[in-house]
Image (spheres, rainbow, N blue to C red):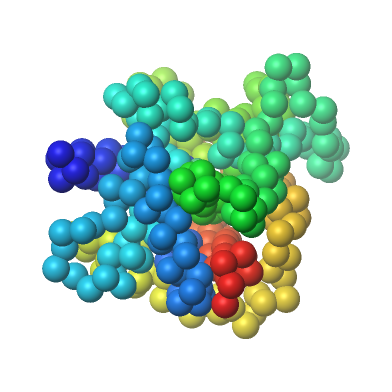
Amino acid sequence: MRVARLLLVFVLVSSVFAWDDVGHKATAYIAWQLMSPQAREKAVKILLSAPEDSHLAVFFSNYSARPLEVRQLEFFMMASVWADVVRDRNFPVRNSKYHKSDWHYFDKFWKFENGKVKLLENPEGESGGKAVEKLFELEKILRDPSVQDSEKAIALAWFLHIAGDIHQPLHNSAKVTEAFPKGDQGGNLFLLTPKGTPREKQENLHWFWDSIIIRNIERGSACDLDFIPKITEMITAEYPLSSMRNKLELGKYDKWHEEAFEIAVTKVYPPTLKMFEMPSEEYRKEAFRISKQQIALAGYRIGETLNQIFGK
Ligand SMILES: [Zn+2]
């Protein structure tokens, strides 16, 4: 039963999600490298206590011949994408209980006016998302000794995920234009494919940023445990902890958001970027550079936060 379900869950993870699963797993991997043995052990113990109907603990492989340490790392990386896994409507019970579409982002509404960024009130009926307030709440749950591990497991999986999402600039921005008076939904409405492209073949700006890592590094047939370490080594060599230690701003989730929002308004929508056109080579390189930097920062922040919460 457990094995069957395990297979089922793995199949579901193969599709591409926000800060697609490579981005999240790379972030989790970087965090893991930074975590103390005690913090790792605590995190794994908590995640294994997840309620059965969440299908979270099934990501831990009991059957593998691989060393425990490797399986724990793999489990931790999978936990960081669980919040996307539960989007699947083929599991209606799990979906209705655990899926929270507006926890993945916190959009600030804005527009360009005379070449300057102008912040706007949220349009009527638009919440803008809950990512920031949830990060504060989740940290509190993780620190609370009176909360059961089963509840903490869900909180930790969400924390790992949202703390990654909030570093993707487009999870922080809703750009208002004449075409999109209620905002462009983090670039989801900003199409890059030619006008008239059938829906299933459309590509948008949000997708472009979510998937930038995987589209710029040759993966071949490498499995996660070969591929993720390879790309994170590259990312952390380019952006080592020593270069970021003084801007970790632990616990200041509003600042993490502000920083990524700033990137969204200054870097994501240059005048050269046009609807219905693929971004330039120069834009692609810049997006790749920014994303690597943001993934490194997210990983360091999560790792240090969990060290603080679970002890060094
Ligand atoms: Zn997400």
Image check: 175 left or right of 297? Answer: right
User: Residue at position x 43%, y 68% from top?
Assistant: 41
User: Residue at position x 69%, y 22% from top?
Assistant: 126
How many callouts does the rendering have? 0
Q: Height in image: 62 above or below 179?
A: below
Front-most of residues 269 and 129: 129
Front-most of residues 112 and 292: 292
Residue 20 locus on image (x, y percent) = 42, 48
Residue 300 locus on image (x, y percent) = 57, 69
Q: Height in image: 92 above or below 22?
A: above
Q: Is residue 139 visible?
A: no
Image check: 175 left or right of 196? Answer: right
In the image, farthest residue toward the top: 124
Q: Height in image: 265 above or below 8?
A: below
Q: Quadrant of residue 301?
A: bottom right
User: Residue at position x 82%, y 31% from top?
Assistant: 120
Front-most of residues 264 and 11: 11
